[in-house]
Amino acid sequence: MLNKLKIKIFADGADYDQIINFNDNPLIQGMTTNPSLMKKAGINNYQEFCKKVCDKVKDKPLSFEVFTDDFKDMIRQSKIINNWGKNVFVKIPITNTKGQSSNQIIKELNNEGIKLNITAIFTKPQISELQKNLNPKIKNYISIFAGRIADTGIDPNGIMKFGITMANEINSEVIWASCREVLNIFQAEKVNCHIITVPHSILNKLDKIGYDLNDYSEETVKEFYEDSLKAGFKL
């Protein structure tokens, strides 16, 4: 079923062994990570980890994020990350922690030929402003955090469609970011999103696609029953 979808699936995580496994999977067409995922994975040396990944993943796009709040330092870090490989995209947050727009350095880096993945996008105004600063001669990614938008009770589809229309005009691709469940892959496909980043934990559930719901119900009941026995619960 997934092979028939137009949307590209990128693996999102920081588990090195899983990254290598997903690299061998033709269904996975790219890899992304971020400082929070790397922290949770216990990674202490940022550059060492990223270069280790780059040594193994050479034919699929990789996205690595800057981790500074200073725009001048963002430029410095971006140039270092960019040199790790031709398949590397530099992740730049749409603002810094003070809410100051990153668009000026986005424009500067893009005009120097650096491929970018603009991340943490939530609103239509952010998308509109970004359109003025991305260089259409450079292939870029625009990561709209559909999952986190949905967490606020807002349907992300309108924002996603707005971003996709804009991206198509400037040679960029929209990423459905902060995927929460397997269903999101099909939702992203329905709005013609170009890419979805899927956490490793959710990728490991793909074998459940098309699973018989009656069988799944019985399997779930057995799981609860067996766990209660193992726990030694009594009433």
Image (cartoon, rainbow, N blue to C red):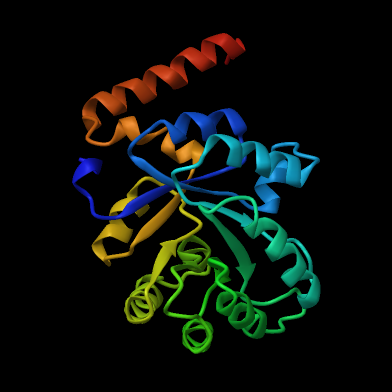
For the C terminus, the quadrant is top right
- Nearer to us in this view, 102 or 41: 102
Q: Would you place residue 108 above or below residue 142 in this image?
A: below
In the image, 114: left or right of 162?
right
Q: Residue visible at 22% across and 35% down?
A: 210
Q: Residue visible at 65% across and 46% down?
A: 37
For the N terminus, the quadrant is top left
Q: Is residue 70 visible?
A: no
Residue 112 falls in image quadrant = bottom right
**In the image, residue 43 lies at what x, y percent?**
75, 39
Total marks in image: 0
Q: Is residue 45 visible?
A: yes
In the image, 86: left or right of 80?
left
- Nearer to us in this view, 46 or 13: 46
- Nearer to us in this view, 78 or 38: 78
Q: Would you place residue 177 above or below residue 157 in this image?
A: above
Q: Would you place residue 100 above or below residue 62 in this image?
A: below
- Nearer to us in this view, 44 or 59: 59
**In the image, residue 115 lies at what x, y percent?**
53, 66
**In the image, residue 125 lies at what x, y percent?**
51, 88
Q: Would you place residue 89 above or below residue 108 in this image?
A: above
Q: Residue visible at 47% across and 51% down?
A: 61
Q: Residue visible at 42% across and 79% down?
A: 136
**In the image, residue 20 lies at what x, y percent?**
52, 31
